[in-house]
Image (cartoon, rainbow, N blue to C red):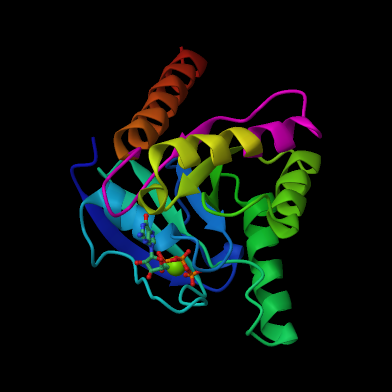
Amino acid sequence: MIKSAQYIISNPDVTSCPQSSLPEYAFIGRSNVGKSSLINMLCHNPKLAKTSQKPGKTLLINHFLINNEWHLVDLPGYGYAQAGQKQREALKRMIERYCLLRDQLVCLFVLIDCRHEPQKIDLEFINWLGENGVPFAIVFTKGDKLGKVRLKENVEAYKTRLLEEWEELPPVFVTSSETGLGGEELTNYIEQINRDLEITRSRDHE
Ligand code: GTP
Ligand code: MG
């Protein structure tokens, strides 16, 4: 359960991110997919991470401290068409460097808008994560915008698409920041990993 959530700092590069040994979880995905909104939903604080109806709101690496035990990270979106090519490339580099160099990163959550068919940019990014050995899970967002049946169909279609290239599916979550759907599952998943890490750590110290 998330009992406390506190904004820590925003950085333009992974090298200036907090020096800490706390486990870290980050949200990534296309601009406007609902990364910042999902963080606010999980933390029960609509003002924690800045959100906007216009894409391109989050432009830095934002750290939030959860329960004084772990970090949740809000990343900029990728592939925002209206941003100039220069800005797009700078953000791409910021995201890639974070994914590859942030040792504390335990799991990257790739957010996908449940309403759309699988998009090339997301599939390419997911493949890039696989090639580089970055652990990830998939989170469908805006679940409130579809009926139950359609939502299930789209999620199943996405899984089928992923299985064309992957032997195994990553963990998959279905969420809505409007209704709170999937929030508990996502938090439980993170907290279970934290407990496992804690056990491994204390064993290593024996
Ligand atoms: P960038 O920071 O620009 O990359 O976007 P983001 O991925 O952080 O998206 P953000 O959370 O700012 O949300 C974008 C828009 O989608 C806002 O208008 C949100 O209110 C809306 N939105 C986000 N999540 C949901 C959801 O679960 N349901 C609905 N109905 N709207 C959502
Ligand atoms: Mg954002």
Residue drawn 64% across and 33% down?
Answer: 159
Q: How far across and down, in percent of the image, does residue 188 sit?
A: 34, 29
- Seen in the image, is 12 located left or right of residue 161? left
Which residue is at 77% across, 48% downward? 128
Q: Is residue 165 highlighted in magenta? A: yes
Q: Give the residue drawn at x 46%, y 25%.
A: 197
In this view of the protein, can residue 106 be seen by the observer?
no
Q: Quadrant of residue 82?
A: bottom right
- Can the viewer see residue 174? yes
Q: Across the whole image, how many numbered discs are drawn on residues?
A: 0
Q: Is residue 174 above or below residue 4?
A: above
Residue in front for this viewpoint, 19 or 179: 179
x, y percentage for residue 5?
A: 25, 52
Instruction: Give the percent coordinates (x, y) of residue 177.
Output: 32, 53
Main SS of the magenta part reads loop
Magenta span of residues:
158-182
